[in-house]
Amino acid sequence: MNAIQKNMTDAAYSQLIALRKNNISGAQCVEMTTDSLMEEFGCSRRQAVLKVTAAWYDLEAAGAKSAYIDVSRTTGNSVVIHDTATGRTSIFSVRELLQLRDQAVNPIAINA
């Protein structure tokens, strides 16, 4: 990660933390922080929203017993997830994940 990417990541975390403290909805937090990064760093909407969304989900998972993606076993067509609370391992195809996304009630969408 270069210095600009690190600064973008740090900016995303700090702005999201501040917005979350003010009880702003997840979608609004992501949108406002995305706009801020685009303006501050002169980056594309896609680059900004990817940074912001990753930071959002990192903050959501902080302090929780959670699962993690096993990147050494994940491929371009499947994702391997280890659930640390239950010890269970699950493998999902990309097709299955897209079906789950389409069924989600309020997903954070990246339209960039």
Image: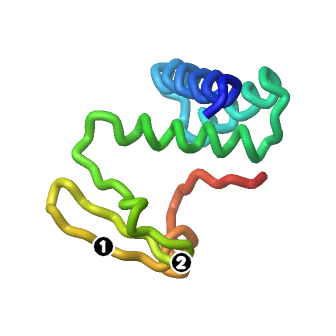
x 79%, y 42%: residue:
45
Between 18 and 1, the one nearer to me in the picture:
1
**Quadrant housing residue 92:** bottom left
**Quadrant housing residue 4:** top right
| Residue 26 image offset from top left, x and y in percent | 54, 39
Most extreme residue toward the left is 86
Task: Give the distance between the C-alpha atoms of the residues marked 1 and 2, in whole angstroms.
Answer: 14 Å
Relative horizontal placement of residue 35, taking residue 20 as reference (left or right): right
Between 33 and 69, the one nearer to me in the picture:
69
Relative horizontal placement of residue 53, taking residue 83 as reference (left or right): right
x 44%, y 39%: residue:
58
Q: Amino acid at mark 2?
A: Asn
Q: Please identify, in this view, whether the residue under mark 1 or under mark 2 is nearer the observer.
A: 2
Relative horizontal placement of residue 83, taking residue 48 as reference (left or right): left
Quickly name the residue at label 1.
Answer: 90
| Residue 25 image offset from top left, x and y in percent | 54, 36
From the image, which quarter does the N terminus lie in? top right
Crowd band around label 2 with a 10 angstrom C-alpha radius: few (<14), some (14–19), many (20+): few
Disc 2 secondary structure class: loop
Disc 1 secondary structure class: strand
Between 69 and 20, the one nearer to me in the picture:
69
Quickly name the residue at label 2.
Answer: 77
Q: Amino acid at mark 1?
A: Ser
| Residue 6 image offset from top left, x and y in percent | 61, 26
